[in-house]
Amino acid sequence: MMAVLPNDEPAYSIGVDLGGTNLRVAVYSSALECVELITLSTRLQNGPEAVLRDMCEAIASLRLRSKNLGRFAGVGVGTPGPLELPAGVIRNAPNLPGWDGYDIRGHVEAAVGLQIILECDANVAALAEFLLGPAPSYGASSLCMLTLGTGVGSGLVLDGAIWHGEHGMGGEAGHITVDPQGALCGCGNHGCLEQVASATAVRRMFLESAAATADVQLVESMADPGFGAKEIAELARLGHPVAQEVFRRAGRGLGLALASLINTLDLPLFVIGGGLIGAWDLFAPEMAVEVHRRSYVYRIAQTQYESKPARPIRIEPAHLGTASGITGAAALPFQQVRSLVEEAEAVSR
Ligand SMILES: [Zn+2]
C-alpha cells in the first residue's frame, strides 16, 4: 500500500463519509489504513443539524482517542453532490432532501474548531481508486470513475488531482444524455446516464417491461420493496429475457457515455464502481461493444502500431468496493499536505 505523505513522520487523518443511509467517520494512518471506524445511521428525518451534530461528536471523540498516532493531518469530508465549491454548500442533492443551500463547511468548522476539506462523494471515491486501485501499477496519472448506485456519480482525477471545474461541480458524467427521449431525471433533464445505468434505473426499467408479462409470480415478487437490481441480476443469470435486456440496456447507456468521455478526455483508465458492478458480467459485454463502436480514440489506443508503446485504455471494475468513499475522504488531508510540500519545494528551487 503506497504512502501518500512525502516523509515517514507518523500522521493520521479523520475521514467522513456522509451517505443518505450511513454516516461513517474513521481514523486513517498516512498509509491509508483504517485505524478506527464509527458507523452511524444518517438521521435524515431529524434534519441537517442533527446529522451534523452526530458527525461532529464522532470527529471530536476520535480526535481525542488518536492523540498518540502522530501528527494530525486534518479532516476530509465526502458528501453527496452537487456540492458548490469552494463555498461548501450543497445544491439540490436528490439523496439529501432539505439540505439545499445548506452551509456544511460553516457548520462543521464552527462545531469542531478545525478547517475541513469538503469534497463530493464521487470525487473522493475516484481519489481512493486512484491511490489504492489499479492506477499505480499501470503508471496512470489520471482516471475517470463512474459509480453506479442509487444514482450515477462520477469523479475525475487529472494528473494526480481531483478536477473541480469552475464551480466545484466538474465531472457530473452521470447526467450525460444517453437517450434524448428517455425518463425524466432528478436534475431536470431527460434520459441521463443515471436513468439507465443506476440500480434505481435497472429496477424501474425492469418493472416497466415486466409489468406487461403474464407471469403472476414475477408480478407479485416485484411488489416487494426489497426486490432490486441484485434480484433482477439473479433472474437474468437464470435466463429471464426481460432481466437480461435491462442489463444490456444499462450496458449500452454506459458504453455511449464512456465513448464520449474517452473521445473527450483520452484518459488511460476508466473505473466503474457502485453496487451495480455485482452485475458486471451482465452489462459489461454490451458496454464494451458500444465503446468500441463509437469511440475512435478508444480503437486507435487499442491498436498496436510499431511506433507506439503498448498503452491501451482500460475500463475496469472498482477495486475498493464500499470503502472507497471513507478512504478517499481520509486521503484528502494527506493529499493537501503533499501538494503544499511540493509547492514549497518548487518555490525553493
Ligand atoms: Zn440527470
Image: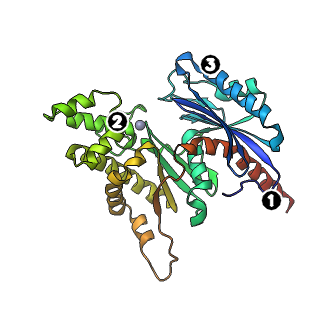
Residue under pointer 1? 346
User: Where on the picture, by quarter, is residue 194?
Assistant: top left
Residue designated by label 2: 228
Type of amino acid under label 2: Gly
Which residue corresponds to mark 3? 50
Circle 2: is it few (<14), some (14-19), or many (20+) Cα within 10 Å? some
Q: Quadrant of residue 297?
A: bottom left
Q: For the residue labelled by badge 1, is the local secondary structure a helix, a strand or a loop?
A: helix
Q: Residue at x 44, y 77 (%)?
A: 304
Decide: few, some or many residues near mark 3? Use Cα within 10 Å; few <14, some 14-19, many ≥20: some
What colouring does the structure picture have? rainbow
Question: What's under tag 1, amino acid-wise?
Answer: Ala
Inter-mark Cα distance, 2 to 1: 52 Å
Residue 195's place in the image compared with 42, above or below, is below
Whether label 3 lies within 8 Å of ligand 1 gets the answer no
Q: In this view, which residue lies farthest toward the top?
A: 46
Side of 13 relative to 324 (left or right): right
Q: Is residue 34 visible?
A: yes
* Mark 3–mark 2 distance (CA, rounded to whole Å): 30 Å
Q: Picture coordinates of residue 264 (x, y %)?
A: 47, 57
Query: Which element carries disc 3, helix, strand or loop?
Result: helix
In the image, taking residue 84 as reference, residue 285 lies left or right, namely left
Q: Residue at x 13, y 34 (%)?
A: 214
Dot 3 and dot 2 residues touching (CB under 8 Å):
no
Mark 2 lies on a secondary structure that is loop
The total of numbered circles placed on residues is 3
- Residue 24 x/y as whole percent: 61, 34
Quarter, ligand 1: top left
Marks 3, 1: nearer the viewer: 3
| Quarter in which the C terminus is drawn | bottom right
